[in-house]
Image (spheres, rainbow, N blue to C red):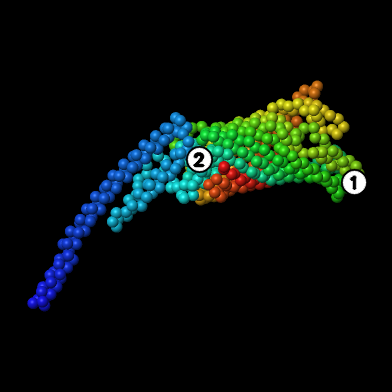
């Protein structure tokens, strides 16, 4: 009896197993799962469409609020990053064995890169609408162009080295019989080295305004040499002149205009006043060495400032065009007229008079690329066009100083590295492209956001 019951139970289990693995049962189960998957996918798509519409409306309202009331960007950026992280989590959602459902791009908001872990720790940023930089390297580029104001105090120690030289070939005489030169031939050379260290403090109390104060210390060294010592073309006379003291202290103000639309260009207006705290270039005496047939001339000292009050104003435009950042700027400078107790170069007389420095224009064009979340590189061209200086000795009319007009064009290559959310350093190499520009310059800056 027990054996019969065991055989009956075994037969029943085997029959149930066959029925469960039959094609009809498998088809019914697969059909039910497919219907559930389709229903879940339809619900997920509807939720995503609703979320996209709500996010687009929030972006429009945020932009309108920023334009109307100048809201602080550092309050909006964390919310945008949080929404981006939530959106990223939804895109990774899968149903069953199907592929992830791709989220369509928003229609009203400009597409933006996903924030990284480093970007989420970035300090509060300036007023940039929907195009706020999400990485430290991009934020550093914006700050260098004064298009992103870090709230609070930023202290920037910097040092700049520049080198320039020129050679003059002077003929003082006349040609005899059309082929023989009678007179003096002078070959002179001048080498100039300038090392300028400075401390710059920037303070921003709202996302659209920034105040700046810069205090420089200038060290200069110039070497003058000329052939013809002791009436010999093989001997060279040489003299080294150095000077170090404060340069011209300057104060600046920056104001960022509201963006016309998300993703549009950012425009920053600026004004700056330079105070003549450095050593003025007027009244410096020229020393001439004529002993033993020498023909060397050199100044008794070197200037570290302009000697004049200077006011400048201009504008900077920066445009994000992934993966590049385009920027351009124009500044104009005006030097105010000043009177000096001595403007002459003779060692044996003092000549009081007035100086009207030449006005200038500085044009900047460049582009920057973010290589990753911490490193960016930039290329720019700067051209300074300076008009001639005029002087007027007391009792005489105004006259133009010959050779005082300049055109100095420099090509810059820079690299920026963000060491932390509040610190980055920038290295820039400048290559002179005209005779009036330095042959070579190297600049290091270390901004510290407090």
Q: Is 70 positioned to the left or the right of 107 in the image?
A: right
Q: Residues within 10 Å of mark 1 (few under 14, many from 20)?
A: some
Q: Nearer the viewer, mark 2 or mark 1?
A: 2
Q: Is 203 positioned to the left or the right of 243 in the image?
A: left
Q: Which residue: 57% across, 43% down?
A: 449
Horizontal and vertical percent for residue 317?
53, 36
Tell me: residue 319, above or below residue 6: above
Quadrant of residue 263 within the rendered picture: top left
Check the image and name the residue furthest to the left: 1
**426 or 168: nearer the viewer:** 426
Q: Secondary structure at mark 1?
A: helix
Q: Which residue: 70% across, 40% down?
A: 217
Residue 125, numbered circle: 2
Q: Secondary structure at mark 2?
A: loop
Total numbered circles: 2
Q: Residues within 10 Å of mark 2 (few under 14, many from 20)?
A: many
Q: Label 1, on which residue?
A: 230
Q: Earlier in the sequence, mark 2 or mark 1?
A: 2
Horizontal and vertical percent for residue 120?
47, 47
Q: Is residue 122 visible?
A: yes
Q: Is 259 positioned to the left or the right of 172 in the image?
A: left
Tell me: residue 365, above or below residue 117: above
């Amino acid at each position: 009896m027990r054996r019969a019951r065991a055989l009956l139970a075994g037969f029943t289990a085997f029959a149930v197993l066959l029925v469960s693995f039959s094609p009809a049962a498998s088809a019914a189960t697969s059909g039910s799962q497919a219907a559930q998957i389709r229903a879940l996918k339809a619900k997920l798509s509807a939720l995503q469409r609703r979320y996209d519409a709500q996010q687009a409306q929030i972006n429009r309202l945020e932009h309108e609020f920023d334009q109307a009331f100048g809201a602080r960007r550092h309050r909006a950026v964390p919310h945008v990053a949080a929404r981006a992280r939530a959106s990223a989590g939804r895109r990774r959602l899968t149903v069953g064995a199907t592929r992830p459902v791709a989220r369509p791009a928003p229609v009203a908001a400009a597409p933006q890169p996903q924030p990284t872990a480093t970007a989420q720790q970035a300090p509060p940023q300036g007023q940039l609408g929907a195009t706020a930089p999400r990485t430290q390297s991009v934020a550093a580029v914006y700050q260098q162009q004064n298009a992103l104001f870090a709230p609070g105090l930023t202290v920037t120690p910097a040092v700049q080295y520049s080198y320039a030289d020129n050679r003059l070939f002077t003929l003082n005489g006349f040609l005899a019989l059309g082929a023989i030169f009678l007179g003096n031939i002078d070959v002179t050379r001048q080498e100039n080295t300038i090392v300028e260290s400075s401390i710059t403090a920037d303070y921003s109390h709202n996302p659209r305004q920034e105040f700046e104060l810069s205090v420089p210390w200038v060290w200069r060294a110039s070497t003058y040499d000329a052939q013809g010592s002791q009436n010999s073309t093989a001997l060279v006379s040489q003299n080294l002149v150095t000077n170090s003291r404060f340069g011209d202290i300057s104060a600046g103000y920056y104001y960022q205009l509201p963006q016309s639309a998300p993703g549009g260009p950012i425009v920053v207006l600026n004004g700056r006043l330079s105070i003549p705290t450095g050593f003025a270039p007027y009244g410096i005496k020229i020393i001439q060495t004529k002993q033993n047939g020498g023909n060397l001339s050199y100044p008794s000292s070197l200037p570290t400032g302009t000697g004049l009050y200077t006011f400048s104003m201009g504008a900077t435009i920066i445009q994000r065009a992934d993966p590049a950042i385009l920027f351009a700027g124009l500044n104009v400078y005006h030097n105010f007229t000043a009177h000096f107790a001595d403007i002459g170069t003779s060692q044996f007389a003092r000549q009081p008079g007035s100086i009207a420095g030449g006005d200038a224009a500085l044009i900047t064009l460049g582009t920057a690329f973010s290589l990753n979340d911490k490193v960016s590189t930039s290329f720019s061209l700067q051209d300074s066009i300076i008009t001639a200086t005029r002087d007027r000795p007391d009792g005489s009319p105004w006259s133009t100083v010959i050779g005082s007009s300049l055109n100095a064009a420099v090509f810059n290559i820079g690299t920026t590295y963000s060491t932390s959310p509040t610190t980055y350093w920038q290295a820039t190499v400048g290559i002179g492209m005209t005779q009036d520009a330095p042959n070579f310059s190297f600049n290091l800056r270390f901004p510290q956001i407090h």
